Amino acid sequence: MSIKAYQRAATQADNPRELEYRAFGQVTAGLVRVKETASATTVIAEALDANRRLWNVLSADCSTPENQLPSPLRAQIVSLALWVSRYSSEVLRDGADIDPLIHINRTMMEGLAAH
């Protein structure tokens, strides 16, 4: 997902929670496509990169003093973003299973949808 696509999604969302849910939906769909098809390395790399960029945006947002989430939750999101980055490298480099990334994203989506 490109930055332009993320920005387009931002203008279509009614609130930040919907934006985040849509962004997770898009990158998770890309990860699922990688899992379900015999994807070329470039397709896998693109899906992982889009997922990493989403988590980096969330991590950066959680690092700002203006973020209104509770501090422990912000720290957990930053920690997850670091894990996503490291694990994505394992997927690309070592062929690790992509399922944990899909699971984390779906869990985040469930949390976003619950409120």
Image (cartoon, rainbow, N blue to C red):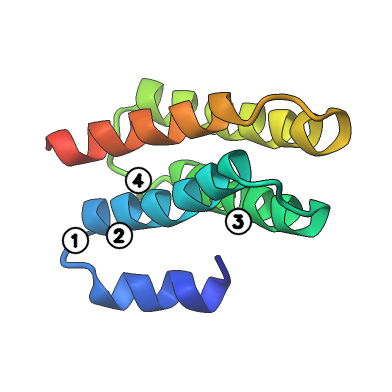
- Mark 4 vs mark 3: give the one in front: 3
The residue at the point 55 percent across, 49 percent down is 33
Give the percent coordinates (x, y) of residue 77: 47, 31
How far apart are the two marked residues, 2 and 4, measured between alpha carbons? 16 Å
| Residue at the disc numbered 3 | 50
Counting other residues with Cα less than 10 Å from the Cα at mark 4, is it few (<14), some (14-19), or many (20 or more)? Answer: few
Q: Position of residue 34 (x, y in %)?
A: 62, 46
Q: Mark 2 to mark 1: distance in Å?
A: 6 Å
Residue density around tag 2, few if under 14, some if 14–19, many if 20 or more, within 10 Å: many
CA gap, disc 3 and disc 2: 15 Å
Q: Which residue is mark 1?
A: 15
Find the distance from the CA under tag 3 to the CA under tag 1.
21 Å
Q: How many marks?
A: 4
Q: Earlier in the sequence, mark 2 or mark 4?
A: 2
Between label 2 and label 4, give the one nearer the viewer.
Answer: 2
Of badges 4 and 1, nearer the viewer stands 1
Check the picture and name the quadrant holding the C terminus. top left
Q: Give the residue number, with chain letter if any, for mark 2.
A: 19
Q: Which residue is mark 4?
A: 67
Disc 3 on helix, strand or loop? helix
Residue pictured at 60% horizontal, 54% vertical: 53
